[in-house]
């Protein structure tokens, strides 16, 4: 997670072991959803519930650490 002045500007997700048709789709789609919404509270990807939740949780934790300095 990269941010500037309280704004999320990039979300980089790694998932080399994800199934391309489910978790891989979440990894592709969710970063832009998060940036557009400026929130990690976005709708997950259908069929990739666990991956979607992991992305949102890890992203929020990383953002919180960045903002804490």
Image (cartoon, rainbow, N blue to C red):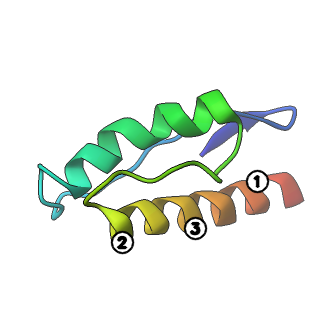
Would you place residue 37 above or below residue 64 in this image?
A: above
Mark 1 surroundings within 10 Å by alpha-carbon count, few (fewer than 14), some (14 through 19), many (20 or more): some
Read off the residue under disc 2: 50
Mark 2 crowd level (few <14, some 14–19, many ≥20, 10 Å Cα): few
Which residue lies at the image location 18% right of the left edge and 61% below the top edge? 18
Q: Secondary structure at mark 2?
A: helix
**Dot 1 corresponds to which residue?**
66
**Which residue corresponds to the image point at 55% horizontal and 60% vertical from the top-left?**
56
Per the image, the residue denoted by label 3 is 57
Q: Earlier in the sequence, mark 2 or mark 3?
A: 2
CA gap between label 2 and label 3 equals 11 Å
Left or right of 14 in this view: 10: right
Q: From the image, state whether disc 2 or disc 3 is nearer to you.
A: 2
Which quarter of the figure is the C terminus placed in?
A: bottom right
Q: Position of residue 43 (x, y in %)?
A: 51, 50
Q: Where does the image place residue 52, in percent across and percent down from the top left? A: 41, 60
Percent position (x, y) of residue 3? 72, 36
Label 3–label 1 contact, CB within 8 A: no
- Which is more N-terminal, label 1 or label 2? 2
Pick the residue in front: 34 or 12. 34
Going by the image, does 55 lie left or right of 18?
right
Instruction: Give the distance between the C-alpha atoms of the residues marked 3 and 1, in whole angstroms.
Output: 14 Å
């Amino acid at each position: 997670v990269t941010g500037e002045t309280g704004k999320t500007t990039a979300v980089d997700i790694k998932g080399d072991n994800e199934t391309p048709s489910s978790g891989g789709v979440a990894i592709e789609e969710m970063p832009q959803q998060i940036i557009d919404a400026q929130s990690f509270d976005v709708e997950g990807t259908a069929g990739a519930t666990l991956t979607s939740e992991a992305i949102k949780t890890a992203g929020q934790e990383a953002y919180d650490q960045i903002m804490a300095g």
